[in-house]
Image: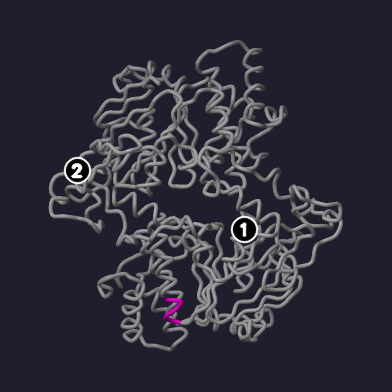
Amino acid sequence: MSEAPLLAVENLSVAMGATPVLEDVSFQIAPGETLGLVGESGCGKSVTALSVMRLLPNPPGKFLGGRILFDGTDMLSLDIAALRAIRGDRIGMIFQEPMTSLNPVYTIGDQIGESLIVHRGMNGSAARTETAKLLDLVGIPAARNQLDRYPHELSGGQRQRVMIAIALACRPKLLIADEPTTALDVTVQAQILDLIGRLRVELGMAVLLITHDLGVVAEFCDRVAVMYAGRIVEEAPSAELFRNPRHRYTEALLHTMPAANPPGRKLPSISGTVPAPADRGAGCIFAARCRFAIPRCSTDLPPLTEPPHRLRCWNPA
Amino acid sequence: MSTLLEVTDVATYYAAQGATIRAVDGVSFTLAGGEVLGIVGESGCGKSTLGRTVLRLVEPTAGSIRFLGEDITKLDRRAMVRRRRNMQVVFQDPFGSLNPRHRVGEIVVEPLEVHGIGDARSREARVSELLALVGLPPDAAGRYPHEFSGGQRQRIAIARALVLEPKLLIADEPVSALDVSIQSQIINLLAELRVRLGLAMLFISHDLSVIRHVSDRIAVMYLGRIVEIASTSEIFDSPSHPYTQALLSAVPHTDPARRRERILLSGEMPDPAHPPSGCAFHTRCRHAMPRCSGGRPLLTSRPTQAGPREVACYLY
């Protein structure tokens, strides 16, 4: 990357109580770039997003080491007032479940307007005018009439559009989207991804997209990082990673997908399950399930290689 | 192969807040012994209600359901319980569908007790056999559901469903709650059991790539109706109904060669309490013609090179 990164996560380690959940996680996002963070349940992708925002509940969450540099400022050094000034202003967020992230007793107009009043110092009527424009931007038509509606009056797709309007109200430099379309139907997902993609270009915004859906990442992201058991195991430009997966976990994951196999054929599977943190040895955490493991894999932790195609594997494809 | 299940003009309506929700609204299809019919569609299209209606876990408002030649919609409760020996179900949530206070052995043996099959010893042997069949360790019988992972719990639910050797399994989103690497194990298990036991399945899912992998034929549902039904290869190689086309185009793929030109639909599925007139899809269809909002298009057979397919659309 030639430009200074907008977000640089450096050697981040996080524990929940005594359990390590992120170990030595490093990645960067350039201004305007889209990075996908993929992995299965419990791999640490959502914890990464919450850590960047400093939203991880503490206790039990605990930062063990590393830095999170946003626009040159270490997020870990900021006090709560400084964090609040950044959240919702220069960093926007959307989550999987728009029903639980919206407040059921406030109108959507109030909820979108709130960040304009807090961060931009707008008065009520200026915020209302701007809110109507934002709803228009996210594709909720006849926006003025919609301002006084409550979340329960909207469909799932419309609620996610409202969440996007809230996240984008202050034109953030970075949007963190944690499984933004997982609760939505596939045709609505296509609409929402199309919307985020267009707004990203219009606003010159970088996106950190967290998802378990490899297809979504392949179509939406410039680069992708694959996580397994709290570590990034592979990272590359999307087209490269899906054409040429090199870490054995990424390779196996792509092979198990029904879409990658002829109908009716037995699907390749990954044997075993992710080991519990207490059962993780010194080497590569995937070694016990890996068909290509060599003796060294269970004793030495492979280092993450240099960009553009980074991976942690002693015996890559 | 002979017809196992024949569903004719089935409708299931719910009363909700003074309105009538037409969850299933005039659905017909047949299923042969040993065949897998995939039912695909988005939230609210009625696919789960259809599955429950076939088992009469929900009562149909109209229509007939013939299972092994007999119309089961007229049977009383006790007679229906006996028929369910041949029709079993696996649900999406392996956490919600297993009683947490019962040991796995008790969960799997229960259908045998309900139907009065065998004695204590033969039942125990049968449970061990089933646990082995679905790939669980022999000591699983003495343990509780919470001791197992999501994938293993789904294996327990499958063992319970198959202990009676049913002819029909209704699988309602059986892998949707599972991670990709676990999904493939359960899909393989169902495919293997299907061959080994000659099982017919209604495989209900919103996931098109899973549906494509397991089904012989596919029915696409929209707002309570089947809009298209054809062989798996026909649906994927040349989808006919504009909704099927839009649905397939929306699926993101890792392989650029598999991507279709995306057809973005406007809006969302209309409220099933107030479905649009005529073809329910006409409000979002890029090919809509004046007549589409008039009479409702019926599923009509249309001969193609790969065999007949049925589409409910005035384009054809």
Residue that label 1 marks: A39
A244 lies left or right of A108: right
Residue A106, percent from left and from top: 38, 69
Q: Is residue A60 visible?
A: no
Residue interval drawn in magenta: A199-203
B33 lies left or right of B118: left
Q: Quadrant of residue B184?
A: top right
Residue sitting nearer the eye, B257 or B232 = B257
Where B165 falls versus B239 (above or below)? above
Q: Is residue B167 magenta?
A: no
Residue A215, percent from left and from top: 52, 58
* Residue type at the position of mark 2: Pro
Q: Nearer the viewer, mark 2 or mark 1?
A: 2
Residue B236, percent from left and from top: 40, 46
- What secondary structure prevails in the magenta region? helix
Q: Chain of mark 2?
A: B
Using the image, tell me which numbered label, if any, was put on residue A241: none
Residue sitting nearer the eye, B24 or A154 = B24
* Residue type at the position of mark 1: Gly
Task: Describe the element under mark 1 as helix, strand or loop.
Answer: loop
Using the image, tell me which numbered label, if any, was put on residue B297: 2
Q: Residue at x 44, y 32 (%)?
A: B36
Task: Describe the element under mark 2 as helix, strand or loop.
Answer: loop
Residue sitting nearer the eye, B231 or B244 = B231
Q: Chain of mark 1?
A: A
